[in-house]
Amino acid sequence: MEVKYFDNSATTRVKDEVFKEMIPYLSIEYGNPSSLYSIGRSAKRAISEARRRVASLINCSPEEIYFTSCGSESDNTALKGIAYANKEKGNHIITSKIEHPAILNSCKSLENKGFKISYIDVDKDGMLNLEKLESEITDQTTLISIMYANNETGVIYPIQKISEMIKRKNPHTKFFVDAVQVAGKIPIDVQELGVDLLGISGHKFHAPKGVGALYCNSKTIITPLIIGGHQERGKRAGTENVPYIVGLGKAAEVATDFLKYEATEVKRLRDKLEAGILKNVYNARLNTGAALRVPNTTNIGFEYIEGELILLHLSDLGICASSGSACTSGSLEPSHVLRAMNVPFTAIHGSIRLSLSKYTTEQEIDYVNEVLPGIIEKIRNISPYQDELAELKKLKTH
């Protein structure tokens, strides 16, 4: 059965040109980049070139890029690195209620060590309460961590506006942005945004799993999370994962060329998918309303039915989708993001995320729009909420 992949916010296919560039560093160019012999020097040069390419993707100096193993490591390094480096100046951190678990669980860990954390609410469309955010900033606030776009809904947050607000209220407060869901989808310019730290993950934009990067501007001091050798200029010890770093660099270079395609063609396909579902399924609702989103992601709730059943039926037809964050898919708890948005309980358990990439085709969109209404009807027929569904159908069809 041919796979129709609609879970690109969870992970992406490695691009052919990325894989091709990695191969020599898995075979003949296998030297340790800290070694002085020729294949060691070759590996070191490859890392430098990858660093330059990643820096170019987000408009910073190569010396401000530090390679990590993933987005979660970048998140942990930023939060804990800033918290510990500045604990004499203050112990207050601000974040939002809809962050990735890597942020929220890092904050819980810091709370257990005596740090004070403020969690900012969002509205029904998933947008941040910026007035509340500004009111929480004090002279003890050392760090604010806000994601660029949400991993479950794709909602984009006004990072530049938040950065300007922080500088007005407390110019000493550092600003970290988890940009895992936007890298390769929309342009990122850390100079224009005015952020101090920013994290990305390779496998979200067609590099392999197991490599990420942290931007840390030259004026920002962090305490290293991993201690050992001299690698990454003392910020992240351990022999560098050369093939994967090379892959990340190539993916960053290629991503720059596809930003326009993401903003136009991928968005067009996403909008067509949404329109088809909302037109043909009366108990479907778009969970994000009119909020600005990354071009590839939609989160749709199907009222009075179970999302897990939808995903299983889709899987039987070769369609890969998810109920939200891949990092929490093993949990039976409803999405913390959708709960924070006050999505009705009638839809929260029936919500699924569909996310596209440059490899998504028109035929795949048409196929999902063709088969999904039948799947939903089959599940509605066994729902214990028949009276509520009948009333909803009456409202939606009149």
Image: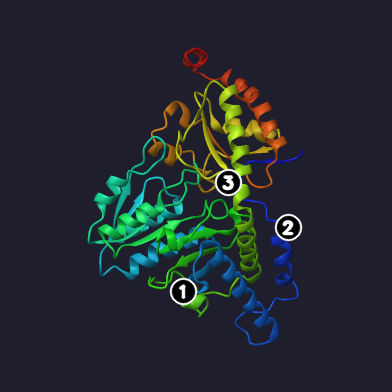
Q: Where is 233 relative to 264, above or below? A: below
* Secondary structure state at the residue bearing disc 1: loop
- Mark 1 and mark 2 lie on one chain; the one further toward the N terminus is 2
Calculate the distance from the C-alpha at mark 1 to the C-alpha at mark 3: 35 Å
* Secondary structure state at the residue bearing disc 2: helix
Q: Going by the image, does 252 lie left or right of 214? A: right
- Mark 1 and mark 3 lie on one chain; the one further toward the N terminus is 1
Q: State the residue position of label 1.
A: 235
The residue under the point 70% across, 66% down is 22
Q: State the residue position of label 2.
A: 16
Q: Going by the image, does 78 lie left or right of 67? A: left
Looking at the image, what colour scheme do you see? rainbow
Residue that lies at the very extreme toward the bottom in this rendered image:
36
Horizontal and vertical percent position of residue 131:
28, 45
* Secondary structure state at the residue bearing disc 3: helix
Calculate the distance from the C-alpha at mark 1 to the C-alpha at mark 2: 31 Å
- Mark 2 and mark 3 lie on one chain; the one further toward the N terminus is 2
Contact, mark 2 vs mark 3 (Cβ under 8 Å): no
Contact, mark 1 vs mark 2 (Cβ under 8 Å): no
Q: Which mark is residue 371?
A: none
How many other residues sit within 10 Å of disc 1, few (<14), some (14-19) or many (≥20)?
many
Q: Amino acid at mark 2?
A: Asp
Q: Where is 370 relative to 142, above or below? A: above
Horizontal and vertical percent position of residue 23:
73, 67
Horizontal and vertical percent position of residue 267:
59, 41
Camera-near label (2 vs 3) is: 3
How many other residues sit within 10 Å of disc 2, few (<14), some (14-19) or many (≥20)?
few
How many other residues sit within 10 Å of disc 3, few (<14), some (14-19) or many (≥20)?
some
Image quadrant where residue 141 sits: bottom left
Quadrant containing the N terminus in the rendered view: top right
Q: State the residue position of label 3.
A: 263
Image quadrant where residue 356 sits: top right
